[in-house]
Image: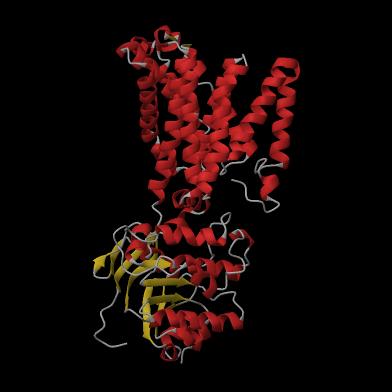
Amino acid sequence: MPDTSKHLLFILAPLVVVFAVLPGVYQNHLLLFNFVIFLILAQGVNIIYGFTGYLPFGYVGFFGAGAYGFAIMVMHLQTPAPLAVLVGGVVAVALGLLLTPLLRLSGAYFAIANLAASLAVLHFVANPALENITKGPYGVSLTGTFNPTDAYYAAIAVLALTLGGVVYLKNSAFGLALQAVREDAVSASMAGVNVVKMRVIAWLASALVAGLAGGIYAWYVSVFYPDNVFSSDFSIFAIVFALFGGVATIIGPIVGVLILYGIYNLIGFTTPQYFQLIYGLLIMGLVLFLPAGLVSLATRRGWNVP
Amino acid sequence: MSPETKPILTVSRLVKRFGGFYALDGLSFHVVPGEILGLVGPNGSGKTTAINVISGLYAPDDGEVAFDGAQAGGIASHRLVHRGINRTFQVPKPFLSLTVRENIQVALAYGHAAGHAAATPPSMAELLDEYRLKEVADRPAADLNSAQQKMLDLTRALATRPRLLLLDELAAGLNPAELDWIAGRIKALAATGMAIIVVEHLMGFIEQITDRVIVLNAGKEIFEGTLATAVREPQVIEVFLGGEHAA
């Protein structure tokens, strides 16, 4: 069986099926929904960071843009929710296009500029002068489209799409060329790879994923403020989860979300007073001892990790 | 080489400035298919800059690069690769975290423009075998020693089926047995009609493989001909050894 089918059958399919049936047996649906959202965002970070090396510290900018794209369509044009989610994705891609000049930067400079860009989008959206369009800092209420069940399944659909995209990257010449660009852009161009085009495609793909997730998030929660959907927690969590598992793999970010977000909630339920202490130590340990993520425990031994 | 053979690359009055420094100051030369041309000169004379401009890494400030009759100066590297120019780097630049096989795969997959079904690219097995990389094919490029990384750099270039190959100090750091072997390989490539420009400090190696050399100094050519004649030319002796050695 080719690797692509193996990865679709043994990674994507079980994950999607498990999350599709879980609401029937587990009552905390909001928690399940958040898991799915973080699975999507961690894979979005994987696409741009794992495959091209750009660390998107302002990744939440796309998420928030998607949420507000959704909200504006619903508030002003009474668009049906699924269509508004797609518009959320398109808005994020448009923002991504606007930000393509950032790709001229690299390393920490890109991360900082991207963070600044996401803050700029936040303050643009939260500007009281735009109250007629975005409701400014006062937040939006989208009771008309409120339907957590549909939103949850839409999130699973986007998760499947995102995972499918990562499976493609992991198994195609395109994904290999992206990694080549990450390793050495000059050599990649001498291998015939159009470096700028590849980077832009990966950047827009990761923007699309976050925008769709943001639109679905808006659909699910229905009432939110700019500070909620542009919270830097989304960027940081998605990056930490992806790094914890190990980027440029399919299962790394999945493992990262399941373990770290699992622990996060476990501590939050049981011993919230120690939360920051335990979580902080955990992340420090990761950075010190496993900088390439959990999957490096296997790759170090020469095992091939999908 | 027959005199009526048309040059595949013609460089005329090429200028490349870095601030006020003229790395190339009106360089002109040409290469014909199947020829091995040596670029020699003291450090800083513009050899690597010339290769960087021809391979599209730098845009020229003035002058012309014509490849196959068409303008090639200032065009993006990947487009020049698709048109048939490739190179190796003085310090090899493989994709370190990818395996040797994956390194070559990228070039095999992207080295050709769609619709340019000219020559069949060499096969992965051939390349690995001919450049002694078979044993390490599934190891990350970071594990290779420097000679192997140089060979990987060369196979990455060859996978795109170039008609003009620029070798920037490929021989530096190789042992005598490896030098003989790679000299043979380069000559075999030229015999297939590939034009090859070799930048090198090892004069014995240049003598062994080149048909003709261009001696550069301060971004200009000061001599053109065989290496044997070059070493008797007073101006060449002067830039290499200093004025008192020139008779």
Q: Is residue A197 above or below residue A236?
A: below
Q: x and y percent of residue A161 in the render?
A: 46, 34
Quadrant of the rendered image containing residue B159: bottom left
Residues B247 and A62: in front is A62
Q: Residue at x 58, y 80 (%)?
A: B178
Tell which of A33 and A38 is nearer to you: A33
* Location of residue B91 by image quarter: bottom right
Colour pattern: secondary structure
Side of B199 where B141 appears, left or right: right
**Depth check, front residue: B80 or B205:** B80
In this rendering, the answer to whether A121 lies above or below B238 is above
Residue at (58% x, 17% y) in the render: A24
Tell which of B1 and B230 is nearer to you. Answer: B1
How many labels were placed on the picture? 0
The image shows residue B71 at horizontal and vertical percentages of 26, 64
Would you say residue B77 is visible in this rendering? yes
Q: Can you see residue B241?
A: no
Q: Quadrant of the C terminus of chain A?
A: top right
Answer left or right for A30 relative to B49.
Answer: right
Where in the figure is residue B199, as x and y percent of width and height? 46, 75
Where does the image place residue A273, in percent across and percent down from the top left? 75, 15
